[in-house]
């Protein structure tokens, strides 16, 4: 019988189908839209579906068939622990950088996984092609379905599985670290980070690590006190739940944010931002340009801030930064670029005919804020003016948000809560008692 339906094989079958179907959907979507991230997610689904497939087929009777099905189970490479970590990391990299390319530097991360595949190919060639087919030697193991080298391969797989777990947790840590850097990159370059913050990605990373931790715990318990096949089966049920979450969360996630993302974990922008943060930490008071228009400071006082520290010396401001701070403030007041919901640092720099590095220094040093907070401060001030203006009394909060440069009510609420420590409705009630 090709597939014996039992409670254990049947419960794993839907997860297997889910993984294969969504893998195909992601590959087609990625090919049509030119999205490398879809391809990486499809590979991640495959790598998690394969070990589940091994146990599903095992409980479906393939190991006990004592024919070519059993031989297939011994020689097909179901487990790819050494490839899981790099795959998830490069899925993150391709998702946050639309210029990401899989070059030689990236391929080196998969050399251990490629070495494992090469070993399994040698085992297959020696046992099946050479010993069994060419020399006509019968298989000696498992009722004449397994060769001698396959038994050695099973022992090697146990050691490689331990290395695989270490690799997965190492790449998981690396991905979480770069995700935190990515969030700083967004705040330094984009005024609307909602669609591209990928908050679900952190949950996805945690889910993957938890799922693998469950498998690791089962493995450790199995070493201390050998478990039955049925007891180990529950770890693959957890793998099935992970496949379900991976496929749904990944498929439903936004994949074509605008503007394009170009995050590099070791970019000069990141180093510059980090150095500016350190510099600001030792300044007693962030320089407030004396020439900044009083009218603007009255309208948006949150745009000029002070950072108090324990240092006793004050840093003398760069005259060039002072000049650019005044130019930026005049531009913000007269042109009101913050009303564009998708305004980015590069677009604002182009309007001022300067570069992003200089503009970022001006905002960080002279205003003590990152780009996201700086722009949203103007939007909040604009919303407050509209909430007090009788001409806008008939506007809903959503309409006020859209008229002030926000692109959604959720972002409006989140930014208001962050910068004003109150919700828009609370502020509106206070402004219009």
Image (tube, rainbow, N blue to C red):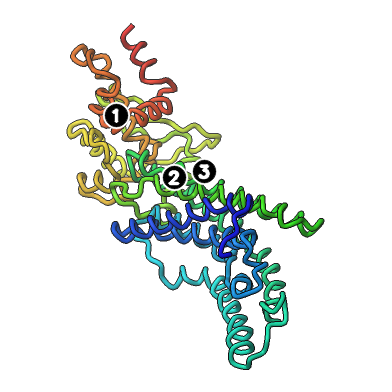
The secondary element bearing badge 3 is classed as helix
Nearest to N terminus: mark 1 or mark 2: 2
According to the image, label 2 marks what residue?
Answer: 183
- Decide: marks 1, 2 in contact (CB < 8 A)? no
Are there few (<14), some (14-19), or many (20+) residues within 10 Å of tag 1?
Answer: many
- Please state the total of marks drawn on the protein image: 3
Nearest to N terminus: mark 1 or mark 3: 3
Instruction: Say above or below: 144 vs 319.
Output: below
Q: Outermost residue toward the top?
A: 433
378 on left or right of 171: left
Nearest to N terminus: mark 2 or mark 3: 2
According to the image, label 1 marks what residue?
Answer: 379
The secondary element bearing badge 2 is classed as helix
Q: Which residue corresponds to the image point at 29% horizontal and 29% vertical from the top-left?
A: 379
Q: CA distance from mark 1 to mark 3?
A: 30 Å
Q: Check residue 306 in the rendering and tell me which mark sits there, or answer none.
A: none
152 on left or right of 72: right
User: Would residue 408 be seen by someone viewing this image from the given angle?
Assistant: yes
Which percent across, then down, holds residue 58? 64, 62
User: Would residue 268 be seen by someone viewing this image from the given angle?
Assistant: no
Q: Which residue corresponds to the image point at 38% horizontal and 56% vertical from the top-left?
A: 26
According to the image, label 3 marks what residue?
Answer: 203
Q: Quadrant of the C terminus?
A: top left
Which percent across, then down, holds residue 418? 43, 28
Q: Nearer the viewer, residue 304 or 341?
A: 341
Are there few (<14), some (14-19), or many (20+) residues within 10 Å of tag 2?
Answer: some
Instruction: Say above or below: 402 vs 152.
Output: above
């Amino acid at each position: 019988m090709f597939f014996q339906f039992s409670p254990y094989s049947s419960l794993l079958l839907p997860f297997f189908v889910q993984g294969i179907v969504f893998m195909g959907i992601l590959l087609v979507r990625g090919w049509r839209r030119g999205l490398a991230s879809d391809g990486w997610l499809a590979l991640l689904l495959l790598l998690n579906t394969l070990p589940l497939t091994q146990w599903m087929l095992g409980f479906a009777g393939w190991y006990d068939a004592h024919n070519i099905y059993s031989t297939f189970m011994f020689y097909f490479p179901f487990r790819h622990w050494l490839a899981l970590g790099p795959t998830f990391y490069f899925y993150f990299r391709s998702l946050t950088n639309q210029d990401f390319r899989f070059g030689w530097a990236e391929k080196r991360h998969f050399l251990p996984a490629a070495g494992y595949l090469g070993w399994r190919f040698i085992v297959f060639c020696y046992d099946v092609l050479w010993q069994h087919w060419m020399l006509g030697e019968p298989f000696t193991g498992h009722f004449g379905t397994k060769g001698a080298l396959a038994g050695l391969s099973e022992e090697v797989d146990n050691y490689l599985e331990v290395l695989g777990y270490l690799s997965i947790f190492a790449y998981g840590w690396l991905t979480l670290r770069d995700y935190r850097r990515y969030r700083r990159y967004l705040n330094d370059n984009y005024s609307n980070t909602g669609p591209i913050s990928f908050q679900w990605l952190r949950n996805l990373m945690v889910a993957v690590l938890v799922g693998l931790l469950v498998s690791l715990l089962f493995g450790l318990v199995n070493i201390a006190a050998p478990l039955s096949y049925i007891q180990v089966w529950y770890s693959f049920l957890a793998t099935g739940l992970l496949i379900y979450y991976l496929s749904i969360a990944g498929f439903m996630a936004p994949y074509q944010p605008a503007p394009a993302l170009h995050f590099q974990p070791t970019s000069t922008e990141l180093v510059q931002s980090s150095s500016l943060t350190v510099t600001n930490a030792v300044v007693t008071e962030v320089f407030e340009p004396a020439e900044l228009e009083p009218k603007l400071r009255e309208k948006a006082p949150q745009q000029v801030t002070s950072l108090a520290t324990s240092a006793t010396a004050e840093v003398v401001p760069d005259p060039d930064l002072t000049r650019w701070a005044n130019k930026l403030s005049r531009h913000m007041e007269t042109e009101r670029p913050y009303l564009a919901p998708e305004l980015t640092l590069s677009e604002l720099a182009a309007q001022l005919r300067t570069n992003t590095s200089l503009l970022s220094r001006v905002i960080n040093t002279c205003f003590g804020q990152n780009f996201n907070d700086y722009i949203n401060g103007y939007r909040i001030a604009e919303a407050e003016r509209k909430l007090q203006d009788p001409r806008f009394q008939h506007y809903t909060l959503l309409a006020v948000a859209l008229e002030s440069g926000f692109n959604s009510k959720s972002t409006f609420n989140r930014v208001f809560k962050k910068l004003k420590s109150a919700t828009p409705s609370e502020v509106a009630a206070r402004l219009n008692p």
